[in-house]
Image (cartoon, rainbow, N blue to C red):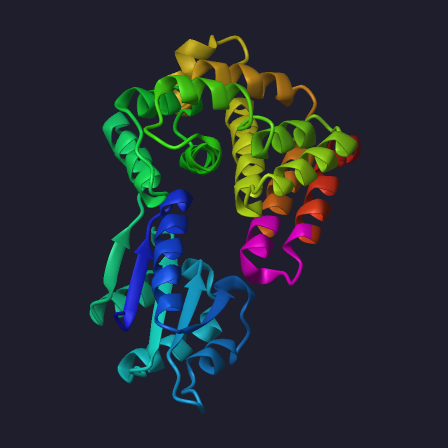
Amino acid sequence: MKAFYLILGSEGALSDRAIDRLTVELKEAGCEITNLFAAQTIVGDISDALAPSLFSQRRALILRDLQDLPEENRDEITRYLESPDESLTVIFLHKGGVKGKALLDAIKRVKPEVIACEPLKKESEKEGFIKELFLDNHRKASQGAINALVGALGSDLRELSAAVSQICADAPVGIIDELMIDKFHQGRIETTGFDVADATLDGNLSGALIALRSALETGTDPVMITSAIASALRSIAKVSSVNRGVKSFELAGQLGMAPWQIDKARRSLNRWSPGALADAVGVIAQADAEVKGAASDPIYALEKAITRIATAQLRG
C-alpha cells in the first residue's frame, strides 16, 4: 500500500467502489482502519488518528469529504504531510471544486495515488463501469444485459451499483443475459432497496419498514438502501425546477434522466412541499454517513431516517 491516496471527484458510486477496493487491500494487510468525516472533526481528532501506534502495527486513516474540513483543523494535515509515518496509509476523499483547494494542492504535492471519480457522461463509460462491477463480483454479463441495465436505470451509478449487486447475488451460475436483467428488474431488485425507497417517499411508513426488513434479510447492503432513497429524492428535486408543461422526453437530456424516471418523479412531487423535500435530503445524507460507519447501529439509523422521511410530507 502507498502512503497516500486521493480519491477525487463528485461521483459517489465511483468513490464508494474505490474505497471498497482499498479497504479490502488494507484488511488483507492487517491494517487497523479509522474512518473520519471531515465536517464532524474537532481540533485534535485528525492528529490523534495520525499519531504513531504504540504497537507498531499497520494502520490506515480514511478522511471523507475533505472539502468540508473546518479551517482550524487543516494544519493537522499539512504538518503530517511534511513528516509522514511509514506504518500509516492515509486516504483522502475530496469531491473536487474550489472548496478546500489550498489543502488539496498541498496533498497533491506529496504525489498521492490519485483515483479519479468524476461523473460518467458517455454511455460507453457507464457500460464499462457496469462490466467492471460484474467482474468485481466474479460474474460475467452479456453486452445485451449491460445495455438493458443502462437503459432501465439511467445515469444514476449508485442505482446501477445496487442493481448489479442484487443480480449477482440472485442470478444462477453462468453468464448473466438480458432475460435475467428483465426478470430481476421486474422482481427482486424493485422489491429490495428500490421498494424501500418507493414506500418511504410515498409516506407509507409501515410498508417501508416491512420492505426494509425484507431487503436486509435478502442480503441488501444498508448503503444500497440509502442510495436508492437518495436517488429518488434527487430525481424529485430535479423535476421540481422545470416547467410541468414540458414533455418528459424533451427533458431527458437536460436532466440526465430517462423519461419514465421523470414521469415517476413528477408523480411523487405532488406529495412533497419544498420544505419537506429539503429536510428529507438532509436526513438521508446523515443516514448515509451513519450506515458507512458514523453510527454504532446502522440499522437503527436507517429505520430512524426512513421514519422521518416517510412522515416529512405531513410536516411539510
Residues 301 and 71: in front is: 301
Question: Residue 206: percent from the left, percent from the top?
Answer: 78, 33
Q: Is residue 7 above or below residue 283?
A: below
Q: Is residue 215 above or below residue 267?
A: below
Magenta segment: does it hold 131?
no
Question: Residue 266: percent from the left, percent from the top?
Answer: 58, 17
Answer with the quarter of the image where residue 135 lies: top left
Residue in the image at 45% along x and 38% along y: 165
Residues 288 and 163: in front is: 163
Q: Is residue 238 left or right of residue 11?
A: right
Residue span colored magenta: 287-299
Residue in the image at 50% along x and 18% along y: 262
Answer with the quarter of the image where residue 296 lies: bottom right
Residue in the image at 60% along x and 51% along y: 286
Q: Is residue 229 left or right of residue 154?
A: right
Q: Is residue 155 above or below residue 49?
A: above
Q: Quadrant of the C terminus?
A: top right
Question: Residue 109: percent from the left, percent from the top?
Answer: 21, 69
Magenta highlight: main SS? helix
